[in-house]
Image (spheres, helix red, strand yellow):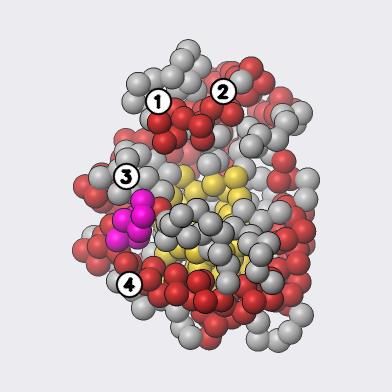
Amino acid sequence: MEQRHLGRSGLLVSRLGLGTMTWGQDTAPEEAAAQLTAFVEAGGSLVDTADVYSEGDSERILGHLLRELVDRDEMVVATKAAIRPNGRYDASRRHLLGALDASLDRLGLEYVDLWQLHVYDPATPIEETLSALDEAIVSGRTRYVGVSNYTGWQLAKAAAWQKAWPGRAPVVSAQLEYSLLRRDIEREVVPAAVDAGTGVLPWSPLGRGVLTGKYRTGIPADSRAAAPHFNEFVQPYLDEECGRIVESVVTAAEGLGVSPLSVALSWVRDRPGVVAPIVGARTAAQLAVALESEGLTLPHSIRSALDDVSDMSAPHS
């Protein structure tokens, strides 16, 4: 798998990341092990988790697999903090550094490679929040830092603050929802990231699974949309406008002889500013299809057609 620099840093990551949000909830440890094995065998290195995923079980499972299954030194381990278990945002220095220590304990690691602010917390002064990133670097608990779900101005402010004084930790990554069904970050966030030298890590690059085409004729019983805890997550992308975009992806896939998933993933992977889409699969079989996208580069004509058909899509919540 091709490796790319994360923003303007020296850190190389695989151009596809493995997401672990379902590990410990919809994905059993044995299935997680199969996913990680297949990912590493394909040349993948970036694996992403968070302290709140499955109430910490995602980190626990990943930590076990890093010790038992793969060479930790070959992996780029990323996690996040800033959301309390009750859903409240908390990017105070006290909470962040405590959350990082708890993450390291669950992972069984002395440090993570990338520690990210999961959300922007308007109740905490940003200079206090960012000071926690500096402390995490200086103390050796992480090697690089990034943000997630920041708006354009929030990202620009954080990146500028960190660059304003020598020795502060640069913001090397920004994790954001980005797909053919969600392109609104192109207006401000992507330009801010490119200007700051911050690499974009798209989450839900398959439009919450809708771009695979599996919802074209209804909601499969074994799909995320059929699960009570995921139905509201998927539902915004099941409207007529999104359906039109999905049909274009399916048409392109049929013409190329590949899966709709590969087309959608290749499109976002090669967008300006993007370093590595984060793919979260429930099963190893689903991940295997995503890994097939590594060999696909979309022809210019198809990329342009998909750009056009998705350009007017309205932002979704």
Instruction: Identify the residue shown where x is 42% and y is 64%.
Output: 77
Q: Earlier in the sequence, mark 2 or mark 3?
A: 3
Q: Earlier in the sequence, mark 1 or mark 4?
A: 4
Instruction: Identify the residue shown where x is 56% and y is 23%.
Output: 238
In-front residue for pair 12/246: 246
Identity of the amino acid at label 3? Gln
In-front residue for pair 114/98: 98
Q: Earlier in the sequence, mark 3 or mark 4?
A: 3
Using the image, determine if residue 36 lies above or below residue 246: below
> Of the numbered discs in the image, which one, if any, rests on residue 226?
1
Q: Secondary structure at mark 2?
A: loop
User: Residue 128: x, y in percent?
Assistant: 64, 77
Q: Earlier in the sequence, mark 4 or mark 2?
A: 4
User: Residue 157: x, y in percent?
Assistant: 76, 67
User: Residue 267: x, y in percent?
Assistant: 61, 38
Identity of the amino acid at label 2? Leu
- As for residue 283 lying within the magenta part, the answer is no
Q: Which residue in the protein does label 4 denote?
A: 105
Is the residue under label 3 in contact with that under label 2 (CB below 8 Å)? no
Quarter the C terminus occupies: top right
Q: Which residue in the protein does label 3 denote?
A: 25
Is the residue under label 4 in contact with that under label 1 (CB below 8 Å)? no
In-front residue for pair 150/198: 150
Dominant secondary structure (helix, strand or loop) of the stretch shown in magenta: helix
Using the image, determine if residue 70 lies above or below residue 138: above
